[in-house]
Amino acid sequence: MFNTESMGKSAETRTRISEVALASFRERGYDATTIRLIATEAGVSVGNAYYYFPTKNHLVQELYRRVQDDHLAAAGAALDGVTDLSSRLEIALHTGLDQLAPYHQTAPGFLAAAISPDSPVNPFGDEATEARDAAVATFELVVRDARTVMPAELRQRLPELLWLGYMALALHFVYDRSPGQEKSRRLATRASRLLATLLPLTRLPFARKPLLELLDLIAEVRS
């Protein structure tokens, strides 16, 4: 009984710290948010905050995971009943931008934190596995329930390629100063429609082989 209660309080404390951190990241940005400030606003000791999140970047990792989970949930709801792959991709890209929108003003600070290969928030690092898997799962959902005809091998491997495309879109979004980031949203729509144009070509051997080689190259870079 004691252990169960203790575990419950521990989970509650961790959640409180993470909620305060996420609010601070939205309002103050990466640089102005500190572990000491978070601890004070969460009503815990600095040592307790460090116990759950050893560095500020571990809190950023929590932010990434939360954003990806919310993206998966939002995309899943919006995709219901949509069967065309390009339409499904457009929905996934736009719902992803919706989740990033509250952090647009403060995003460059997070990007700087992710540059180091050893950073916990490097999207390709081991510590980012949970957030990355959630992100790829969104595009697995996009492809899995699409009725668009495509080669089986491409259907299996396409989600990670779409995720990488989304990463490029997110990078563009960070630096997009157009009103409401309209340029990024137009880019998402145009890229999705371009996919609809190119997909029929993948049934032709001369086009399918280079695409699969590109997927092999991406897998090699990611390994």
Image: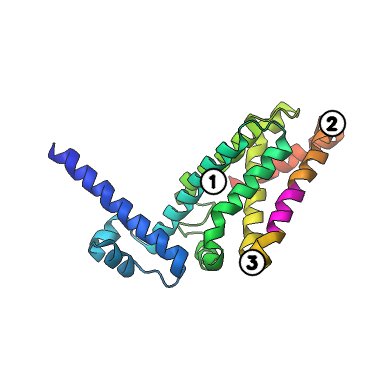
Q: Which residues are magenta?
A: 184-191
- Residue labelled with disc 3: 175
Instruction: Name the residue type under label 3.
Output: Tyr
Q: Residue furthest bottom?
A: 32
Helix, strand or loop: magenta stretch? helix
Determine the secondary structure under disc 2. Answer: helix
Determine the secondary structure under disc 3. Answer: helix
Name the mark nearer the viewer: 1 or 2: 1
Q: Is residue 202 left or right of residue 64?
A: right
Q: Residue at x 45, y 49 (%)?
A: 66
Q: Is residue 186 left or right of residue 69?
A: right
- Residue labelled with disc 2: 205
Q: Earlier in the sequence, mark 1 or mark 2?
A: 1
Q: CA distance from mark 3 to mark 2?
A: 38 Å
Q: Which one is nearer the viewer's eye here, 183 or 113?
A: 183
> How many marks can you see?
3
Q: Which one is nearer the viewer's eye here, 112 or 187?
A: 187
* Label 3: few (<14), some (14–19) or many (≥20) C-alpha neighbours in 10 Å: some
Q: Earlier in the sequence, mark 3 or mark 2?
A: 3
Instruction: Name the residue type under label 2.
Output: Pro
Q: Position of residue 202 (x, y in %)?
A: 80, 34
In the picture, the quarter occupied by the C terminus is top right
- Residue labelled with disc 1: 71
Determine the secondary structure under disc 1. Answer: helix
Q: CA distance from mark 1 to mark 2?
A: 35 Å
Q: CA distance from mark 3 to mark 1?
A: 20 Å
Say if the magenta span includes residue 189: yes
- Please say whether residue 126 is visible from this viewpoint: no
Q: Position of residue 214 (x, y in %)?
A: 73, 43
